[in-house]
Image (cartoon, coloured by chain):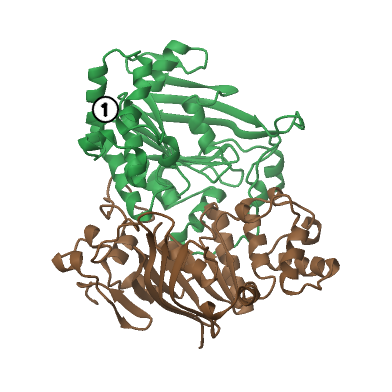
Amino acid sequence: MSTVLSVEDLRVTFVSQKPPVQAVRGVSFHLETGECLGIVGESGSGKSVTAWASAGLLGADALREGKIVLEGQDWAELNPEQRRSLRGTRVAMIFQEPSRSFDPIVTLEKTFWETLRVHRPETTREEARTRATALLNEVHIADAESRLGSFPHQFSGGMLQRVMIALALANDPQVLLCDEPTTALDVTIQAQILALLNELRRRRGLSMVFISHDLETVAQVADRILVFYGGLILEEAPTDVLLSRPRQPYTRGLWDSRVKRGSHYSTTPLTLIGGSPPDPQRPEPGCPFAPRCPRSQDRCQTELPPLEGAVGRRHRCWFPLEEP
Amino acid sequence: MNELLEVTNLTKSFQLHAGLFAQADQRVYALGGVDLTLRTGETYGLVGESGSGKTTLARTLVQLEAHERGTIRYLSSDGSAWEVRRGDRRNLERYRQEVRYVFQDPSSSLDPRMTVGDLLTIGARQRTRGKDRAGLVARAREGLDHVGLRASDWDRRPSEFSGGQRQRIALARALVTRPRLLICDEVVSALDVSVRGQILELLLDLKNRFGLSMVFIAHDLDVVAYMADRVGVLYGGRMMEEAPSRLLVEKPLHPYTKLLFDSAPGAGIRSRETSAQKLTPTRALTGCPFAPRCPLVIDRCRTEIPLPRAVGPQSGRLVACHRVEAE
């Protein structure tokens, strides 16, 4: 296996607010060819900002440090023109709430045509139609050709997410970044989209980063999972290892606090994590989870533990849970 | 009568287009005749996807929307029962104190310019026209304590709180009128995963402490099954299945309930549907709303609306499906 995306000591700070928002505070990871890497975290944990940075999409108010290398090319060393040519052909991204990602007054046909022409300006309208039809078929949109004249509002949320996936794949990228792609959707539609992503991944050999706040959802698609909290990675492990033998108390808490199938208030009490997530404008000097952690001691409050362990199995904790 | 609320044949539709280009006969049928009974002290769970009518049902229960057909009968605290209607202002005012609605997103249901103290008391202050101010403030302060906020939070504004704390403020506001029934519409959906459990536990605590009845609405079937004594499953504005929570989890009978359980992220089962779409009924239905997606569909499902009927002796389960055998 080779590495398609590597992120080294990424730090992102949004300076337009006072005090500045320290969204990502030193994150390193890599994505292997054909792998699906899951990122789980709550709002403000830095998971989306990391993905945006990986696609070179951060705006001018974001102060970025660290290194992001996509297929051997460092984003920082590229000029805007070169970055543009990478987006779409090497890396593509899909987002939450697909309806917001479309221009409401442009038909699908035109949207596809524009997307294809970014990288091949000579694409004719006819070629674009043929290509769009094939892509829509690939994401299982029935009657694809006749739907090319439709506007975004004529599709349901789930259908629109399929269209967005088709658009993301239009220029055959190798890496697909999925930022909460199922969050705004109903559960039955969510399951359909997850099944579709799995299918496309196999068929096209895509490398994927899948981001969600829901550990159970991430666990369904990811081979390996990063747990984000307070702008840092708290734990990294292969999916089954992470769920069965977590080392970081936060990971354990997150997994245990889900409402399990068949449990009922009259017999099973809820497992809780007390307190609330940290404020990215005022990060603690110690472990970001320390104020809420049941195992926390003095050292945790004052000193940030390092991310320890071998590649693929790391945790950041002074007093980790025992390996059973 | 032991029933706090008795809802029969509740029906509500909305005009699809408004304004100049409105097509007069295009209507969305949000509720197509729903029956529901809520017993005193019970938590009734409602699940369904967007467009299933669960929010319309909740909003109609508190008369934020007027219903077109059907009745809502309420057993009041003084033992008298009456029908909840828009025109009946005396009773409606009392009803709205005893039945409170808690919204999904506290960051949009709390006025950012008001202090917590004002948020908790302004509704009641207007209703009583300033009388008994001291009693009201005392009740509101008590409410803050009940939801786990500090007395010093009284003068702060919503922006100074996290999402979970804001939902606590919303709950304290609902408690001020000493309600008997809370209608909780997706109250944990907008919250972070690690905070969700805290609010669920708070709801259970409040329910115990004040003997509250509850209608608990969410799209997450596992959460609803955990919180509720009985669960109703809505699709296309109709009740597909209703059963005691445990029975429903052990053995879902309606094909739609099964699909919901199989689709939940925790189920680990991958979807077999490749691209079925949800349906928004824009015409009065002629058959089962789930028929276009149903794996067991037969001709009869498209032409005849299945009515809820009891399945199993004394199980308390109702199923609206032609393909489920009555035992």
Chain identifier for the green-coloured part of the image: B
Q: Residue at x 26, y 50 (%)?
A: A269
Residue at the extreme bottom of the image, as rendered: A1
The quarter of the picture where residue B212 lies is top left
> Would you say B45 lies left or right of B171 here?
right
Q: Is residue B327 above or below residue A132?
A: above
* Figure colour of chain A: brown
Q: Residue at x 72, y 70 (%)?
A: A118
Instruction: Kindly give the residue lying farthest to the left in the view shown.
Output: A298
Q: Is residue B80 left or right of residue A130?
A: left
Q: In which quadrant of the rendered image does the N terminus of chain B lie?
A: top left
The front one of B296 and A277 is A277
Chain assignment, label 1: B
* Residue located at (62% from left, 58% from top): A161
B211 or A313, which is in the foreground? Answer: A313
Vertical placement of A283 versus B81: above or below?
A: below
Find residue B193 and report its horizontal and vertical position in percent: 37, 55
Pinpoint residue A226: horizontal percent, then vertical percent: 40, 71
Which residue is at a point 72% across and 64% down the rendered structure image? A136
Residue B200's x, y, as percent?
33, 45
Residue B194 can be seen, yes or no: yes
SS at badge 1: helix
